[in-house]
Amino acid sequence: MLALTRRKGEALVLNNNIEVTILEIRGDQVKIGISAPKEVPVYRKEVYLQIENENKAAIHPEGVEALKNLF
């Protein structure tokens, strides 16, 4: 893991086309802004993990059977 120190208004660039900017620092919370192309999905980690779990459940044999029963 790369650890960086940034101040309000400073940014970092990922993969030449994604910019992450520190918008606000309030106590132990940091508000960030992310500029990325529309084709690049951006998720909070907890949402990403939930999507990942739902996708795994959907390919599970029981999940496939449940989907077949819908039709």
Image: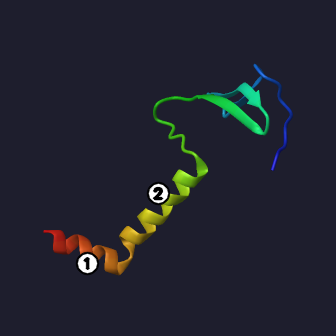
Residue at image point 78% right, 22% down: 8
Q: Amino acid at mark 1?
A: Glu
In the image, is 9 to the left or to the right of 55?
right
Disc 1 to disc 2, C-alpha distance:
20 Å
Q: Position of residue 62 (x, y in %)?
A: 33, 80
Give residue 65's mark: 1
Q: Callout 2: helix, strand or loop? A: helix
In this view, the residue in front, 40 or 53, is: 53
Q: Quadrant of residue 20?
A: top right
Residue at image point 53% right, 53% down: 48
Give residue 29's mark: none
Q: Quadrant of the C terminus?
A: bottom left
Residue at image point 54% right, 44% down: 43
Residue at image point 60% right, 51% down: 45
**Residue tagged 2:** 51
Please tell me which of labels 1 and 2 falls first in the chain: 2
